[in-house]
Amino acid sequence: MTVLGEFALWISLPVALWGMFLGFAGGRTQRGDLVLSAERSIYAVFLLHLVASIGVMAAFLGDKFEYWYVASYSNREMELFYKITGLWAGQRGSLLFWVLLLGFLSSVAVFTNRNKNREFMPYVAGVLQTIITFFIVVLLFAQVNPFERLDFIPANGQGLNPQLQNYWMTIHPPTLYLGFTAFTIPFAFAISALLSGRLDSRWIQLTRRWILTSWLFLSIGIVFGMRWAYEELGWGGYWFWDPVENASLLPWLTATAFLHSIQIQEKRGMLKVWNMSLVLVTFLLTIFATFLTRAGLIESVHSFAQNLQIAYIFLGFMGVLLALCTVLIIYRLPQLQSENQIESFVSRESAFLFNNLLLVGAAFAVMWGTMFPLISEGVTGQQISVGPPFFERVNFPIGLALLTLVGIGPVIAWRRATKKNLQRNFATPVVVGLVVAAALWIMGARHGLALVTWGISAFVLTVIATEFWKGTKARARIEGEGFALAFFHLVSRNRRRWGGYTVHVGFVIMVMGFAGAAYNVDTRHHVFPGDMVEVQSPLGHTYQLTYEGLSVSLGQGQRNLLWQIIATVSVNYDGRDVGILNTEKRRYVTSDQDMTEVGIRSTPMEDLYLILSAVDDTRGALGADSGAQGIDLQVLIKPLVGWIWFGTFMLVIGTVVALWPSADRRRSAAQTEADEAPSPLSAPAGSAG
Amino acid sequence: MKHGRFMVGLVGVAAVITYLVWTGVSSTMVYYLTPVELMERIEEDPSFRDLGVKVSGQVVKGTYHRVEGQLLHRFDIHDLEDESVTFTVEWRDALPDTFTEDVEVVLEGRLNEAGTFEATTLLTKCGSRFEAAPEDLAR
């Protein structure tokens, strides 16, 4: 099976090349047979990569340690679950997994467009096969072939790093990769639009769902990574401004900008060049993120072994793509003229533009900070790095400005907002925001930045709630429906709009959760069995934590676990016993490092987070020496962390609502045609600068 | 006219972001040095001690110990190239799981008058953090 997989990977290269050539040739010559063949080559490549991936999995399941990749990431004792997910546990497999996902999504795109939008498909197929070809070349020739054999057969493999043996860590990479690869489809359509000259907003309408899907998976993938860091890395944080985290944030930022700016192009025929640039930049950033994760160019908690060759290949590919696409955009500039111009500083267009500028600005700042060690070394020969303080300093103000725009953007009038429009929409929310901030101040919250964040959040939530209320009320009155039914109909009649608002609500809740970090409590204690420590939470709760002692269990190599030392702490919350919490040290047979497992007790308002920092005498504890039970216990209180996860949930719900296919497809198709006709709003094309 | 005001707004936002990045870099940047470079810098200019720096070095085997009950860890590191250049590190926090006496560490902090490096952040750096080196497999 594995040999077959390797064979399939090799075969996929000529097939992909063939499809790439046919796609572009079919686009130039308009020959349907060539195009059809190009499209079929995409299905073929996907199937071949499926066989290759199954080959890798078979090698994992069959403990075939003669393969470098299996020997490095698995061993005989590893659980079945991790053997299956071994496909994306390391650099080599995950590159194959990447191209497998891309092949799958490409096939879906080709299949759904098999009878329509034919004018786009030749170049779409060509572009998709180009990207796929690139990854196959990397897999086969850049010393990252997952099928590479060792010249001996090890008795056992090295096993998976224990920190990666975590539920979140197995779903985090696939989710993120889905987000990355899904963005290739809009990119392919954009390039196809440039090549074929069909430069109205058709390509955007066709790929709107893809863009949203990509954005959804990017968002979830990033949050899964945060969740993993929070539970597994054992320091109580979820975001470290680590290069790889930043790399996944970059395409998210530009994709978010893109999601908003395409609405201006659809409604007002503006920003065409900008949108083309954004789709290009976002796509390049997804490639950049893939490469940064897997090349180890910059020091990072995620760093894999340095492999400079692959770095040059990736950078070269990105450079070529950037140059070609820039030339294309310049070539098509005359057809990318704006149909309208901004009429007022105080309008929805303007709010969207500022949103874009801020998001791209944030992306630029994050990029700059991430690459700074390399830049400074290149310029001065001296590595200078910037850490989390830099990113916080720059991104907090930008984030607050963005948060404010979340409240302003959706309700401010298109074209030109009147004073009346502003007063009607914003008077109450501004008051609510101020009142909330003042109330929190009176209750003792003194952290300026957090107060501002919560105040603005209250403003935004009031704006959105008012919109929902007004819409429901109007519908209930006009249609004579009950409120619940009216609400349901309201949302289902314009899913994009109300789904979008729900996403905004989720985002605001997440931001409120982030601001909770201003009130983190961090205490350290050295305790013996029976000792009690009391910790006050910023929300006025009292935790009395009694350290009950250590218990040891010897795993004797089962499931790779050598031993675990479990510290048991009973928790008393405001005078009420609420059970026990464990925090552990573990040793796996595959690693000579201890692993810390933290104990978390979540409530909606705050998390209690216990870390077994150190055991006084590990050897004694393992030897059941009851005297050796002193430990360093770190007790953290993390207010509002749960809001981040809940906000993400809302964000997912909102996106799904916006994505949900319309009940009446035909009507929406007719709608699209109508949209394409010049709207009465449009000014003559080419009148704007 | 409207267009002009709009441009001013956009340029203004861009300028603010540039300003944030610029001041952010200059107020938070740290030099990333090897122990040898750090010693040289301090010799040239003793006030360099007060500047926070980032240093990477190899933990010296057998030097790690934990001061019980104080959450204080001490160990020596030496320069990767020149093993004679070494100093003691004090770390007042929980050690990351990846810390062993075999690793290379990246520290942020300052070298005090007594010649002890007071670290405020500690990262371990090893190519094999998540990926094994194939040579290790030969048994």
Image (cartoon, coloured by chain):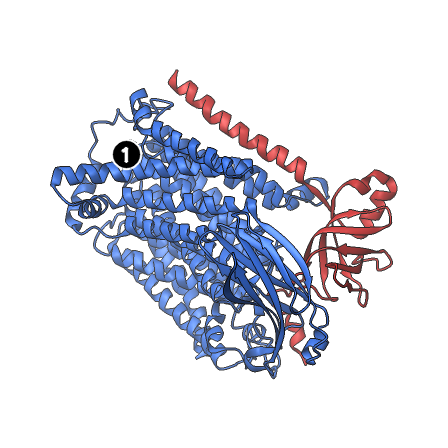
Chain colours: A blue, B red
Residue A350 x/y as whole percent = 38, 28
Apparent side of residue A206 relative to residue A404 in the rendered image (left or right): left
Residue A514 x/y as whole percent = 50, 46
Q: Where does the C terminus of chain A fall, quadrant-wise?
A: top left
**Quadrant of the rendered structure where residue A482 is?**
top left
Q: Where does the N terminus of chain A fall, quadrant-wise?
A: bottom left
Apparent side of residue A609 relative to residue A14 in the rendered image (left or right): right
* Res. A412 in view: yes
The residue lying furthest to the top in this view is B1
Apparent side of residue A358 relative to residue A615 in the rendered image (left or right): left
Apparent side of residue B94 relative to residue A246 in the rendered image (left or right): right
Mark 1 Cα shell of 10 Å, populated few (<14), some (14-19), many (≥20)? some
Q: Which residue is mark 1?
A: A267
For the residue marked with disc 1, what is the amino acid?
Lys
Query: Height in image: B26 above or below A190?
Result: above
The residue lying furthest to the front in this view is A575
Query: Height in image: A356 above or below A205?
Result: above
Residue A681 x/y as whole percent = 23, 27
* Chain holding disc 1: A
Residue A405 x/y as whole percent = 41, 34
Label 1 residue SS: helix
Give the tally of numbered discs.
1
Q: Nearer the viewer, residue A255 or B59?
A: B59
The residue positioned 39% from the left and 20% from the top of the image is B3
The residue positioned 37% from the left and 65% from the top of the image is A46
